[in-house]
Image: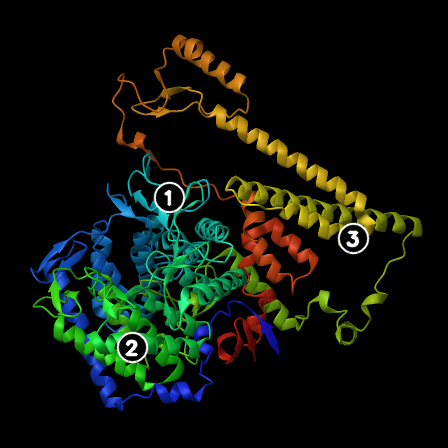
Amino acid sequence: MIIRKAAFFLVLATIVFASDDPKDSENAKSSIRFTPKLISSYREKVRRMFYHAYDGYLNHAFPLDELKPITCVGQDTWGSFSLSLIDALDTLLVMGNNTEFRRAVTLVLEKVRDDANVNVSVFETNIRVVGGLISAHMLAGRHKDLVKEWKGYPCDGPLLKLAVKMADRLMPAFNTDTGMPYGTVNLKYGVHKDETPITCTAGVGTFIIEFGTLSRLTGDDKYEKVALKALDALWSTRSPIGLVGNHINVQTGQWTATDSGIGAGVDSYLEYLAKGSYLFRRPSLMKQFHEHATSINKHVRKGDWFMWVSMAKGAVSLPIFQSLEAFWPGTLTMVGDVQDASRIMLQYSEIIRKYGFPPEFYNIHNEEPVDKRSAFPLRPEMVESLMYLYRATKDETWLELGAEIVDAIESSARTKCGYATINNVKEHNIEDRMESFFLAETTKYLYLLFDPENFIHSKGDQARIFKSSKNLTCILYGGGYIFNTEAHPVDPGMLDCCSIQAKREQEVGEKEVSTGDHLEKRNLTEKGGEKYYENQYGKKEELIQYEVDEKMKAEAEKKKAEEKSQQAMDKVRTFLMRAYLKDEAKQRNGESSDSAKQLLDQLLKAYPNHTQELENVNKEALYLFEEQQHLNDIRDIVKDIPIPDLFCNGCSYPLHEIVDSVALRVMMADIYEYHIYPNRKVKFHHGPVCWLEETPRIEDDYKNEPPSVHTDKWNSALFDSDMVVLSNFLGDDDIEEIRKFGFKYLLAPGYKNIDRRIGGQNIALKRKKAWYYEV
């Protein structure tokens, strides 16, 4: 049976990847025989490496963010979160240290504040702090004594509460015209009024794992919605050849840095499309990933290297390999392109064998590290891909490369209290910094590479059955973990434990399984359907009719046909309106576009009997488009008219009346300025700068409102791309339900719980293509 599913919920646990090309296997033969004893010895080396760095941080740097491993002092880098400790929490559990995990959790809960007056990177705080807390919360259930004290687990707990608070502090960053987030936010006050709107691509598209997980655990869909809207906005800005740039203006959607590649500034956006699709069963994200991958292979890839190119034309702008790009073979392995991933990693392995580890920048033409960019800050991307490739192929070449990296780090980076950044890979001199990802990612991936029996690698043959506080039966720790870009694993089994929607779906699924009624009525007209219905219910479906007046029946059918026609025309009007808006946006940028005309011509050609209706709908769409343009022009003028701002207790609020008339705006401003406010002795001022009647508070310079996500506009706009894919196996009524209910409808794990009825994680799947599986 072929099942089309973009995100089978335990894909990593149940899919076995293997290269079909014997030459790849021959070329990648390891020169060392890795016996179980040798593998175990390297696992122990990595364990000792982790604890040397971890103990050094706690003894010399905690509660600051990072350890300076040469001088053995601490420093704050990303916001004073005790970042290295948060990043190390789940690594402790991966290495089996429940006792130290419990002590570390206590320290985090005592020391970490979410309301500090500090500017933080939205991207880094999300992947390291929010991601680290979520993962530690999820894995904490393996420490049974600890979670007994956490009432409501896995849907509640102190680490989850802290993750929610941190995410809420980041939410004001998403309150932009496009839905793409600012790059920096103040935890206490929000986004500064002068904050730059320029953000890197990864800083826009790297939220769906953490925010989507929060929505599933808390039942609050706002987090997943803002992450999806940011991804949707980013996808809409890709170039005609399918590439994205490096930096974008989050208010206008205009690219400000147009170099395209798979390295710094772009990397985790691509990673999260694939992983987000798997984790949340969203086929549109996998579709976007494959379209990007196709464009990358066509324009960015040169041989088995990846350059930096112009996003518009594909011309090479920088022939540089960046060490961050080494995540790509691991992501390709996840989506089943193991052969290609192996070939790329073999290309990268030349650098490892040459220097011991990869420099930040490597000039492909000169075959040399780039001057002043030749450091190795103990990055994890290379060993991340090695871990995935070894799991997929069992080829000991990947163990050998991992062992070389372990030995090189131990030989060159070790200090008396930790491990230092390699300042130059050619000379192996060091500098005084140990970033938190060494504890979160590098040591974790190396440990998992040499620990094939670790619970993270579970194939679903062992799991824990858990009854959640929402009275849902959950299958936890069964494998299929999805790592965020900071190597914090997310258990997909826990995502269906906590929301009301999940409870309803489980009840429906159990009822269908118990009654045997899991063949959908909409499929009864398909081959065998009528026979099933007759056997199940003792009568044929077509005989179930009621005696009705023929005239009433005809009128009802006519009305139904008219309603269906009207619905179709409404959809056509919407698509034409969007086409006109797209044409106008492109023409504003100096590009030619006539997509609206092309769409209308196609419709007229496809439906010649509806020419008049289509032309009328086109006139309506054009009229609405012109009205909207006129309204926008007026609003551009209106917003520049000064208005009196009202003082409250130490702060000021603008006059909130929203009008689309210049005359009315001026009149209202005069009424408030010369009559209402003076007569009531209310303090006010003109424009954005406060007068000296009162000293403004710090808050007056910040925007601290999260975006509004609970509107019909969000639901109809966000999920069109998912509906295109889903329409292949959903009926028209189901599509309308998705339009109506949006997010909540798509929470279901596949159509009508089909994955649960085929055994979920206990049925091994064989990969056929990108998102097709065969049972």
Nearest the viewer among 484 and 470 is 484
- Of the two numbered discs 1 and 3 on the same chain, state the one appearing first in sequence: 1
Tell whether 670 sits left or right of 651.
Answer: right
Circle 2 packing at 10 Å, graded few (<14), some (14-19), many (20+), is: some
Residue of label 2? 349
x, y percent for residue 612: 80, 43
Residue 426: x and y in percent read 16, 70
Q: State yes or no: discs 2 and 3 in contact (Cβ < 8 Å).
A: no
Quarter occupied by the C terminus: bottom right
Label 3 environment density (alpha carbons within 10 Å; few <14, some 14–19, many ≥20): few
Residue 577 vs residue 110, the one in the foreground: 577
Instruction: Answer with left or right where residue 414 lies relative to residue 637.
Output: left
Foreground disc of the pair 1, 2: 2
- Report how far apart the C-alphas of labels 2 and 3 lie in the structure: 58 Å
Residue 281 vs residue 725, the one in the foreground: 725
Q: Earlier in the sequence, mark 1 or mark 2?
A: 1
Residue type at mark 1: give it. Ala
C-alpha gap between disc 1 and disc 3: 46 Å
Q: Is residue 460 visible?
A: no
Mark 2 vs mark 3: which is more N-terminal? 2
Q: Is residue 631 left or right of residue 374?
A: right
Mark 1 residue crowding within 10 angstroms, few (<14) / some (14–19) / many (20+): many
Residue at the image position 67 percent from the left and 70 percent from the top: 517
- Residue occupying the point 55% across, 61% down: 748
Q: Which residue is mark 3?
A: 607
- Amino acid identity at mark 3: Tyr
The quadrant where residue 283 appears? bottom right
